Image: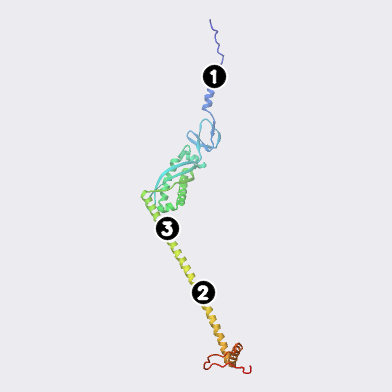
């Protein structure tokens, strides 16, 4: 059985060729470019920088090329940067430096240092140089005690250094300083001795305070006893003076009128006579008065 012949649809080969050629030309001469957020487009023409495009769509002629250049924040990790203090103690530190490319220096950085905005190697080298220069100004104890100032000095010097490369420092994270084992042992020993000294001083101050408190209590008690004794003495003196004054007044009165004494004696004898029951004493002593006898009764 003979199959019917299949007829191919007629499509002009010329049109196919035109379409293919157009696609090739369009690909080769594509004029549309995109600059992502946080980047700048560096436009070059035969290797020479001829312009900078901002974020978004860029339309360029086919003889120009666009390279995306990042101006986002980048970071450089510096591990175990080495330095030496003014008292010749070796010291190490690890840091993280965050930086970005200044927007007005993109062309310069692209031309001289980096085509993508990554200056990590330059930042690491500069940071190590700055760390050595700054630590040489401090003794080891000052490096620890004035950590904030050391960090500020490194930051200021690094800003000035990286500005030469068109970069600006955002911030620096600096970890703890690391000294030699022998020096750290000496520091720990010194801290221990200082703590013991402070403990002894505090104990001495406590003992002195307790002794002062005891002395104050004893002085207060002595003052109280003295005040009590003075009060009693003053009272006794006052009483004695009063008694003496009373005797003086009486003696003065008696001296002025001797009949007062005789009058008192008679009053006493009268009181005795009124109380007498009539019985005579069984014994009469020489010089004793003889009671008056009422013979008529």
- Against 46, is 244 above or below? below
Q: What's the mark number on residue 228?
A: 2
Vertical relation: 16 (above or below) 48: above
- Give the spatial CA distance, label 2 vs label 3: 43 Å
Foreground of the two, 266 or 152: 266
Task: Judge left or right: residue 222 versus residue 83.
Answer: right
Residue 248 at x, y percent in the picture? 55, 87
Q: Nearer the viewer, mark 3 or mark 1?
A: 3
**Location of residue 111 in the rendering, given as x and y in whole percent from the top left corner:** 47, 38
What residue is shown with label 3? 199
Element carrying mark 2: helix
Asked if disc 3 and disc 1 are in contact, CB closer than 8 Å, the reply is no
- Circle number at residue 232: none
Horizontal side, residue 194 vs residue 18: left or right: left
Mark 2 neighbour class, 10 Å CA radius: few under 14, some 14 to 19, many 20 or more: few
Q: Which residue is mark 1?
A: 16
Q: CA distance from mark 2 to mark 1?
A: 133 Å
Q: Nearer the viewer, residue 7 or 21?
A: 7
Say whether disc 3 or disc 1 marks the residue closer to the N-terminus.
1
């Amino acid at each position: 059985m003979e199959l019917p012949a299949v007829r191919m649809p007629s499509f002009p080969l010329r049109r196919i060729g035109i379409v293919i050629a157009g696609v090739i030309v369009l690909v080769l001469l594509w004029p549309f470019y995109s600059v992502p957020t946080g980047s700048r487009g560096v436009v070059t023409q035969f290797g020479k920088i001829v312009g900078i495009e901002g974020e978004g769509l860029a339309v360029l002629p086919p003889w120009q090329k666009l390279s995306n250049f990042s101006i986002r924040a980048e970071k450089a990790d510096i591990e175990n940067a080495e330095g030496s203090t003014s008292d010749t103690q070796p010291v190490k530190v690890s840091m993280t430096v965050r930086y970005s490319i200044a927007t007005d220096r993109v062309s310069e950085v692209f031309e001289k240092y980096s085509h993508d905005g990554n200056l990590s190697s330059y930042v690491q080298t500069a940071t190590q140089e700055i760390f050595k220069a700054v630590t040489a100004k401090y003794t080891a104890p000052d490096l620890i005690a004035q950590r904030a100032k050391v960090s500020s000095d490194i930051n200021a010097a690094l800003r000035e250094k990286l500005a030469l490369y068109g970069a600006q420092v955002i911030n620096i994270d600096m970890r703890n300083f690391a000294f030699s084992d022998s020096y750290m042992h000496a520091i720990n020993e010194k801290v221990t001795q200082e703590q013991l000294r402070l403990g002894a001083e505090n104990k001495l101050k406590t003992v002195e305070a307790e002794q002062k408190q005891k002395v104050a209590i004893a002085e207060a008690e002595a003052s109280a006893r003295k005040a009590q004794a003075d009060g009693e003495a003053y009272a006794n003196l006052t009483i004695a003076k009063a008694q003496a004054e009373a005797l003086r007044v009486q003696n003065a009165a008696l001296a002025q009128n001797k009949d007062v004494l005789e009058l008192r004696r008679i009053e006493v004898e009268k009181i005795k006579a009124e109380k007498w029951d009539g019985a005579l004493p069984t014994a009469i002593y020489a010089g004793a008065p003889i009671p008056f006898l009422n013979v008529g009764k």
